[in-house]
Amino acid sequence: MALLYMTFFASRSAAQKMVVTAPSPLTCGNPSDAVPLYWSTIPSVDVFYTTAITDITSVIRSDGYDFGGITCLVFTTQELSTVPLFHVYNGNDIDNFYTTSTTERDLALESGYTASPIAAYIYPSQICGSIPLYCIYTSIDTAHIYTTNVTERDAILALGGWTDEGITGYVLDYQSTCA
Ligand SMILES: *[C@@H]1O[C@H](CO)[C@@H](O)[C@H](O)[C@H]1NC(C)=O
């Protein structure tokens, strides 16, 4: 009888503990805070990504970039479970590089890139209905492209001269999110 009671008690407290530690929707941050990550480009030179429409306007007016569109949705402040998307710039090769890795950022800083403000906050793993943000790179033009579109990524990789840099992080899809 005592053993039976102990077993019941142990499983009951384990179940209670699970309820307490189960992830709550709040750990996702608030999807309605997510904003467009815009892109603009000088073809065969560079692609620039930013949430600041004033920065897009500035590079179009002053630096010869063309407006591209919206890549995805991201956060501009650190919401729960998100990490910084660091941004560094190389003015010699004209390359905007974005990474969540402090190691990659620091390697770029050591090889001629300069630090820009944090570009956005994104998820480090596929949670909260997020989708992968893929990165491809070409050393021919020293350019990074970021896209959520696998078809587009594979089409550019098939052109040759580009390498698959994997997944930068996880973002929200602007085409399926109804905020
Ligand atoms: C993905 O990219 C392909 C190739 O560029 C394009 O045809 C397609 O419309 C894109 N899909 C979306 C959902 O934007």
Image (cartoon, rainbow, N blue to C red):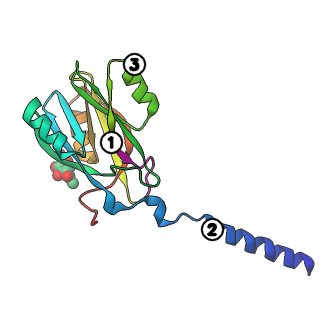
Q: Which residue is mark 1?
A: 134
**Quadrant containing the C terminus in the rendered view:** bottom left
Query: Which residues lie in the magenta part?
Result: 119-127
Is 126 inside the magenta-drawn segment?
A: yes
Q: Residue at x 22, y 45 (%)?
A: 52
Q: Is residue 12 above or below residue 76?
A: below
Mark 3 vs 2: CB contact within 8 A = no
Q: Which residue is mark 3?
A: 110
Please identify, in this view, whether the residue under mark 2 or under mark 1 is nearer the observer: 2
Tell whether 99 sits left or right of 24. Answer: left
As shown in the figure, which amino acid type bears the numbered disc 1? Tyr
Q: Which residue is mark 2?
A: 20
Viewer-closest of 10 and 108: 108
For mark 2, give the secondary structure: helix
Quarter of the image holding residue 106? top left
Q: Is residue 149 above or below residue 41?
A: below
* CB of mark 1 near ligand 1 (< 8 Å): no
Residue 16, given in percent of the width and then of the height, sits at 68, 72
Tell whether 148 sits left or right of 29. Answer: left
